Every structure is written in C-alpha cells, then in structure tokens.
Image (spheres, rainbow, N blue to C red):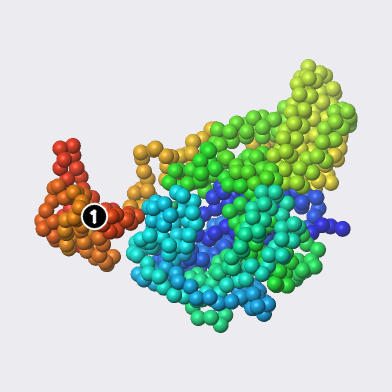
Amino acid sequence: MTKKYLITSALPYGNGPIHLGHMLEHIQTDIWVKFLRLQNCEVIYICADDAHGAPILIKAQKDDIDPEVMTKRIQQEHTTTLQDFNIKHTNYYTTHSDENKDLVEEIYSNLLEDNLIYKKKIKQLFDEKQGMFLADRYVIGTCPACGADSQFGDGCEVCGITYEAEELINPISTITNTTPVLKKTEHLYFKLNTQSNLLGQFLEDAVKQKAIKSKLNEWLDGELADWNISRDAPYFGFEIPNEKDKYFYVWLDAPIGYIASTKNYCDKNKKDFMDIWNKKSDYEIHHFIGKDIIYFHGLFWPAVLNASKYKLPNSIHAHGFLSINGQKMSKSKGTFITADQFREKYEPDLLRFYFASKLNSKIEDIDLDLKDFTNKINSSLVGKIFNIGSRVDAFIKNNNYVLSNKYDRSFVDSQRKQYDQILKNFADKEFSKAVNLILRIADSINSYINEKKPWQLDNEEALLIATTSLNIYIDICILLNPITPKLSEQALKQFEIDKFSFKDLKNDMLGTKINKYKVVVERIEETELNHFNGNEMTVQNDKEISIEDFAKIDLRVAKIISAENVEDADKLIKIELDVGVLGSKTVFAGIKEAYEPKDLIDKNVVLVNNLKSRKMKFGISEGMILASSNDEGGIFLLSSDNGAKPGEKIK
Ligand SMILES: [Zn+2]
C-alpha cells in the first residue's frame, strides 16, 4: 500500500522577503518530501504565508498601503522565490483566506462548546497616540529587576528575567515614542491547563527529538498558563464572532492555515480535504519548524486540534538557527542575506547541497561560512561528483557514444551495496550522512578511474572502464535528486533519463547510445558578504553607507518653542520643538556651555526624528538636534535657511 503523507513547513511571515533562514527550513522539508516522492509515496506538501498580526498592520500603515494588498503582493514574491529554489509545494497559500476564516470559526465554536474558553479582564499598556494596545515587542523600558535600559516588554536581555510589559519602569511605545497608559480590557482565554494529560501523551507519540521532548516536558511539568487567544482592534486578522472589536490572535489562526491551505488545494482538485485531516485519516502529518516555535506547535496546536474534528500531527521536527560566517543573521551587521540576493549570485541548488551537507536530525544551529561554502561546492559537487561525466567522456566518444555491453561487476556491486544505507539516512533526516556516503562513492569512482588509467588502455578496455563508472554515476545522480534536483536532472539528460524514482537505482545501462557530456555545474568564485547586494548589504565596519541606509534617518526641520536649563545637569538644555504636522517633541541637548536658553527661542534646527527615545534622569529625550563641534570646545547648532517650515523632511 502506498504510504501517504501531509508535510508542512512553518509559515513564513508576510511582512518581508524570504531570507536564508527560511530557506534552511524549506530546503530541509523539501529534501524529505522529494525523498518520499522518489520512494513512490503520496506526499502533499503544504505551506502558506502567515499574513496576520500587529507587525503586518504596522508595516502596512508605515508604507501607507492596505494590509490586504501588501500581504497579497508579498505572498506572490514568496511563492516565486521558493519556486526558484526548487521547493515543490503541493500548495502555497495564505492564512488570510475564506477557507481559513471558516475553519478558525468552526474550531473556535468547538472550543466554546467544550467549555474551553473563558473571559478575563486584564490591564494592558495602551498607546493613546496610536489608539492601540501594545504587544510586548512594541514596548521598551527599564528592567524592573536589574535596571537595564531599553528592554522589551516580555523580558530583559541583560539579566534574563521575564515579566509583564506593564512592570517595566518608564515604558515607552516604540511605535509613537510616547508613554503608554494602563488600560482595562477583556480577553478570551483558552484553558490550556486542562489539556496537560493529552499533551503528555502527544509528546510521547509525536516528538522524537530528545531536546524538544525535554523542553516540552519542562513546560508541562510547570504550571501551564492559559492562553490569551484574542487581540483588540486595530488588528489585522479575523474578527471573533459575537465579540465587539476583538480579533483572533495570529497564533491561533496561523497553524489552522495548514488545514486551510490543504482545503484550498483539495477544492481546486476535486478532492475532499477531510480525507486527509479526519481523525482517522491514513495520511501521516509531519510539521517541520524552527526551534523558536516549539511552544506553539508542541502545546497550543495539539491542544486546539484535540478539541476539533481534525487529526493530530504524527511528528514535529525542529531545526536550529542559521548563522552567516559565524554571526547571527542581522540586518545591521550585514549578515542578513535574502534568498533572492543569494540566487542572483549562485545557482540555488548549491545552497541546497551545502545545507544538506550540514543537516541532521538534531536541533543543531547551522553556519553558512562563505569560504567553506565555496570549498565544498568546488571540491565536492564540482570536483568529485559532476566531474565524473566529463572524465570518461572521451572514451565513450571513441565508440560514437555507445556504451559497452559489459561492465566491471565487482566494482559496480561493491558500490551498489551502499545505497540502502543512503536511503535510510534520508528517511531518518540524516542528510549530512547521506551526502557523505554519496561523496564516498564518488571518491571510489574517481580512484577507480585513476587506478585503471583508461587513457593508457585500448579503446575497448577504456570503454568498459567508462561504462562501469557511468553506471554508478547515474545512480548517484538519482540519489542526489532530493538535494540538488535541477543539477541531477541536467546530468541525467545525458542518458535520456527524465522520469525516475528510487526503483530505477541499480538499473544497468549497457550497449545504449548516450549524449555528449555537458557541463552540469561550474566552479564558483569565493565571495564576500557585501557582494550579495551592493545596495543593501553593508559589512560591519564598512564606513560606506548606501542611499537606502541614509534614508533610514528621518531628519526634520524643527522650531525651538521653549528652552530651559536642566537643574543638576551641567551641560543640558531641555528644548521643546515644534515639528509641524508631527506635533511637538522634547529633547535634551548638551549645548549649555555654548548657548543661553533665551537665545534659542524661534531658531530652526535639524532634528533626528526617528532616533530611539532615550530615558534620562530628567525625562525622556525624543530625538536629537544636530550640532557641529571642534576641539576648542565650540558647539554650533545646524540651522536651515529662511523659509523652511517645521516638520519638513530633510533629504
Ligand atoms: Zn534586567
């Protein structure tokens, strides 16, 4: 009986481009999917854009675009990029869909019926200027435990403590740079705590990786907090039925998007998605995720599914994070590479090969070291594997490209013995081991050619060596197909093999006419991080900035409306600025030694408007005014020519 699978990758968030971190997960999933498909299993590979939540709403507002239009555009970009890397989803959809809305409402009503939802009034930080409640990531302030400045609303990066956002000292909204107020609101909670028995069982059955198992067990053994599944308007998501101005929290509807994307595919193809998702379905369901979202997939998702009519996943498989040249991926450090930037420089299959050579079934972080990448591609993929076709081409040519009728059986058999182990490694998600074994076979073929020296033999003997080598070469091209599908298919064209599965391994090719060898992949040049994209990529320490970097600084003309010395501060003057349509701002400027407050009134100055607010002993400084200075101690405020109006953008 054909084994059936539904496999998912976690949903990329719809507010920015696909980057190499996303690619790590999609490549890992896609290798496993392709492996199963080559085993003649039925595999439905599902993904979608995660298109809801506050960050999407805020980005859309900032870019002055309808969030629906924005997420649609980004979904199309994601689809194209993923296809460029030969990721073959059965369906790539969005969570902002009618199918998902219906499913979310249905599952929510099941939760209500099962008495798993209750309401609770809480107090939450509210940004009055923006008119919205603030998610933790939009609040910064001083850590209540250690006093560190500029910490986010969910925990302190300095001392590691976690807290509620309202416990921060002097919290500031990062959206408007204003001080939020505590406001009462009512939320809907899911009784996660009642589900701990089910979750314990789920952990036993579906979680095979030790590190995740013990992390989840740790959470289960502690007090499981009930889960707030609602968010106040304004929000981009689905409204909760029979509630006023309440939306489902994005993390409730995102995983339901797996089911919705399946339904969308099935409806288009006249299938019934319930055949796949019903509790007794004979499809195995496997989720591939990053280690940062284990909590949601290992606790909330199975607990929510359990109360529905849908099947629980058979396994959750987590991977580690990606670093670039040993550093965390970060835009400011220049270590952030989008998938499109990578593809402009290199064939996408090369990234697939590199990741495969490092991936195993554990949750280890993976480093893309650009030097190592170049070496690995040149020495392994180009030098050892795809070079084999070229090495023996001349000897086949001498026979008008017709292979010999026989080969060296003992050599062929000795190599073919190893395929079962390679297939097992694929099945176990031990891709680096599969790559190593394939490379070992390629090494053997190369040694075989070196030892037999066909260039010293007569045509017939040389043809036999070439035919022997190519019979194993064909097999390793097939074995490599899940990893480097495009290169593998290109190489197999030489032998007119276009449709194949792992059943075709060990098929002899004797006495057949084949095509002339064509280069499959060429050596690559080593590259530096900043070569990926001259505009956006800047390496740390590089003094040059791009025009885009400069544009990030929001400089404005501002008029000083009041100025006063700050008591107890030798250098500071407190200045109130009129920034036109942007309202008024307070800054503390260290210019006391050069200016009298009264001389500053009505002066036009240059304000760095989007500088992160800084809490000082005397109050909050909401920006910076620019001045020049020299070694003799002079301070000179920058000013605008007559006619410039407060609030005007400087560019
Ligand atoms: Zn702290």
Q: Point out residue 25 in the picture as x, y percentages from the top left corner.
A: 62, 50
Q: Point out residue 127 in the picture as x, y percentages from the top left corner.
A: 38, 68
User: Which residue sits at x=45%, y=49%?
Assistant: 158
Q: Which residue is mark 1?
A: 588
Q: Point out residue 197 in the picture as x, y percentages from the top left corner.
A: 72, 65
Res 57 visible = yes
Density class for disc 1 (Cα within 10 Å; few <14, some 14-19, many ≥20) is: many
Q: Is residue 445 above or below residue 84?
A: above
- Image side of residue 376 versus residue 344, left or right: right
- Image side of residue 478 versus residue 608, left or right: right
Q: Point out residue 612 in the picture as x, y percentages from the top left corner.
A: 35, 55
Q: Name the image quarter holding residue 559.
A: bottom left
**In-front residue for pair 559/373:** 559
Q: Outermost residue toward the bottom?
A: 242
For badge 1, the amino acid type reads Phe
**In-front residue for pair 224/271:** 224
Q: Name the image quarter holding residue 581.
A: bottom left
**In-front residue for pair 91/517:** 91
User: Which residue sits at x=70%, y=72%?
Assistant: 308
User: Which residue sits at x=80%, y=34%?
Assistant: 472
Q: Is residue 625 above or below residue 121?
A: above
User: Which residue sits at x=45%, y=43%?
Assistant: 334
Q: Quadrant of the N terminus?
A: bottom right
Res 93 visible = no
Numbered disc 1: secondary structure? strand
* The CB of the residue at mark 1 lies under 8 Å from ligand 1: no
Say how many tags the image has: 1
Q: Outermost residue toward the top?
A: 456
Q: Is residue 251 above or below residue 28?
A: below
Q: Name the image quarter holding residue 220.
A: bottom right
